[in-house]
Image (cartoon, rainbow, N blue to C red):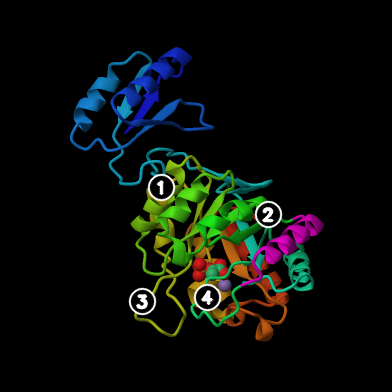
Amino acid sequence: MIIIMDLNASPEQIREVEQEIERVGLRPFMNPGVERKVIAVLGEMDVHKADLVEHFSTMDGVSRVDVISDLWKLASKSYRPEGSTVRVQDVVIGGNRIVVAAGPCSVEDEGQLLEIAEAVKESGASLLRGGAFKPRTSPYSFQGLGEKGLKIMARVRDKVGLPIVTEVMDTHDVNMVADYADMLQIGARNMQNFALLKKAGNTNRPVLLKRGPAAKVKDLLMSAEYIMAEGNQSVVLCERGITTFEDTTRNTTDINALPVLKRLTHLPVMIDPSHATGDWRYVGPISLAGVAAGADGVIVEVHPDPGHAKSDGPQSLKPDKFAELMGKLRRVAEAVDRTM
Ligand code: PEP
Ligand code: MN
């Protein structure tokens, strides 16, 4: 349920509505950064919903009460029909401009990251991605450099000037990763790690939330809601492919998910063609398809020597191929009335 206040509602009237929400055992949540004062009402209210709508409609200063029928509330398109943007330092995701995040799957050493960061910046990327904590299928595979990798990322960020996005896998590491990173990534495998989602919801860092390989679009939205219900509204969703019976690619890109998400939520949406396909040869076409289908951004794995990458080499673009892709992306962005 959302309570839309009159444009000229007084602070006292707003406070009274908030107090009344608490009095009936629910939680008021103010929609920040919006001119119109909208109070979301969170909590279990199924049986009394009709009574509550009636009750709040009669309060002073209230213009209208709307029921949000979606299971996700703060993430619902009806909560912010105008769409929302998420800032990562100076980079705005969800505006007209398509944002590209690029970098290696894993941070391997400072020289490697610096070389990649300079190359992708030169080609027009605005965020640097890289993993320091790696969720690997095998416990014997490279697990990432941990905090050392975060330190490398932070130094490269300071040298090159690209904000950094990196994965956090463990609730105990969230604050530490947030100290280094400009944006936290919650990976596909942890999309429904609710303790981790809540912890990220209590930081002031924007979150890149990737869709689980076996998660429905609705599950992804409920996971975003977990972060938002804790107070953190800066969530960007990411389609990164799902598991299907098809085995010529690592995953199957659910291209449908892009326009579907755009209809169901106000949150910005990115596409990750690297994990979605698992093969550098398909990364270009699927990036272009993603932007054509409405993605607000693309996240691409780039490595100068994919054959020796510590993870995900086969799906990594070499810097020259990435530069080529950026040129094509620019043209597709223009065709769908976006900029780069
Ligand atoms: C990654 O971004 O390197 C990664 C592990 O992604 P995902 O969680 O989508 O598999
Ligand atoms: Mn990867």
The answer to whether residue 72 is above or below residue 156 is above
| Mark 1 vs 4: CB contact within 8 A | no
Question: Sequence-wise, which precedes: disc 1 or disc 4?
Answer: 4
Which mark is nearer the camera, 1 or 4? Answer: 4
For the magenta stretch, what is the residue range?
Answer: 144-161
> According to the image, label 1 marks what residue?
225
Q: Which mark is residue 136?
A: 4
- 10 Å neighbourhood of mark 4: few (<14), some, or many (≥20)? few
Q: Amino acid at mark 3?
A: Thr
Q: Does 145 lie within the magenta span?
A: yes
**61 relative to 69 in the view: left or right:** right
Which mark is nearer the camera, 1 or 2? Answer: 2
Residue pictured at 77% horizontal, 64% vertical:
122
Viewer-side residue, 144 vs 212: 144
Image-quadrant location for residue 40: top left
Image-quadrant location for residue 147: bottom right
Residue 38 pos. (x, y %) = 42, 28
> According to the image, label 3 marks what residue?
244
Question: Sequence-wise, which precedes: disc 3 or disc 2?
Answer: 2
Query: What separation in Å lies between label 3 and label 2 (alpha carbons)?
Result: 36 Å
> According to the image, label 2 marks what residue?
180
| Mark 2 vs 4: CB contact within 8 A | no
Residue 323 pos. (x, y %) = 70, 70
Which mark is nearer the camera, 4 or 3? Answer: 4
The answer to whether residue 278 is above or below residue 39 is below
